């Protein structure tokens, strides 16, 4: 008896459900309510339609999330590209790798964070900006330099101009 407990319960439930349906059918017939044969499986059809719609919904949500992540990636790249216009390739790669760990909440917020990263890592003056052209034009001080050093100074002056 214990071994067949599940089978017995399932059988009893099926008999009760069949009895209920028969009595319901009888009540409908006595009240002159006609239920077409095609409408009997309406609940099953609705359950199947519900499952299909739920599956489509889940697919649409996952696709939307993928597109949102992709759009965020493009926005991140555009902001980093804009911030790194005046940097060398190695500095751009460094800035990109640093910005990967920064959270993206909005475009403005991310742009500020990238600008902060850029300032903190690449904010030092470069060699070309360290030589002030105004200092060169003053010419008050005359310093004697060797020929090889003179060539370097001339090359630097050409780069600045």
Image (cartoon, grey):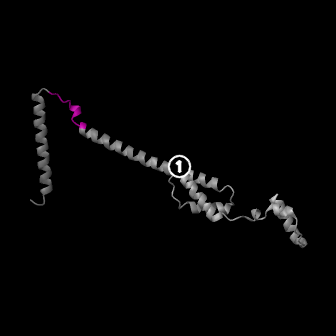
Q: In the figure, 19 relative to 27: above or below? A: below
Would residue 73 be visible to someone looking at this image? no
Determine the image quadrant of residue 29: top left
Q: Position of residue 95 (x, y in %)?
A: 61, 61
Q: Position of residue 149 (x, y in %)?
A: 86, 71
Queried whether the magenta region covers residue 35, the answer comes back as yes
| Front residue of this view, candidates 14 and 50 | 50
Across the whole image, how many numbered discs are drawn on residues? Answer: 1
Which quarter of the image is occupied by the N terminus? bottom left
Queried whether the magenta region covers residue 158, the answer comes back as no
What secondary structure predominates along the stretch shown in magenta?
loop
In this rendering, position of residue 136 left or right of residue 27:
right
| Front residue of this view, candidates 5 and 137 | 137
Q: In the figure, 56 relative to 103: above or below? A: above
Give the residue drawn at x 59%, y 53%: 77
Task: Find disc 1 in the rendering and name its residue.
Answer: 71
Q: In the figure, 42 relative to 32: above or below? A: below
The stretch in magenta equals 33-42
């Amino acid at each position: 008896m214990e071994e067949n407990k599940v089978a017995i319960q399932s059988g009893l439930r099926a008999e009760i459900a069949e009895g209920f349906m028969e009595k319901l059918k009888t009540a409908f017939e006595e009240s002159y309510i006609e239920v077409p044969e095609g409408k009997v499986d309406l609940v099953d059809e609705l359950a199947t339609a519900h499952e299909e719609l739920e599956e489509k919904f889940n697919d649409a949500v996952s696709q939307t999330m993928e597109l949102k992540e992709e759009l965020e990636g493009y926005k991140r790249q555009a902001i980093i590209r804009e911030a790194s216009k005046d940097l060398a390739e190695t500095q751009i790669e460094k800035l990109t790798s640093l910005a990967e760990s920064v959270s993206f909440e909005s475009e403005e917020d991310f742009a500020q964070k990238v600008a902060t990263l850029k300032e903190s890592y690449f904010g030092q003056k470069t060699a070309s900006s360290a030589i002030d052209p105004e200092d060169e034009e003053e010419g008050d001080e005359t310093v004697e330099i060797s020929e090889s050093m003179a060539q370097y100074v001339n090359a630097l002056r050409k780069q600045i101009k």
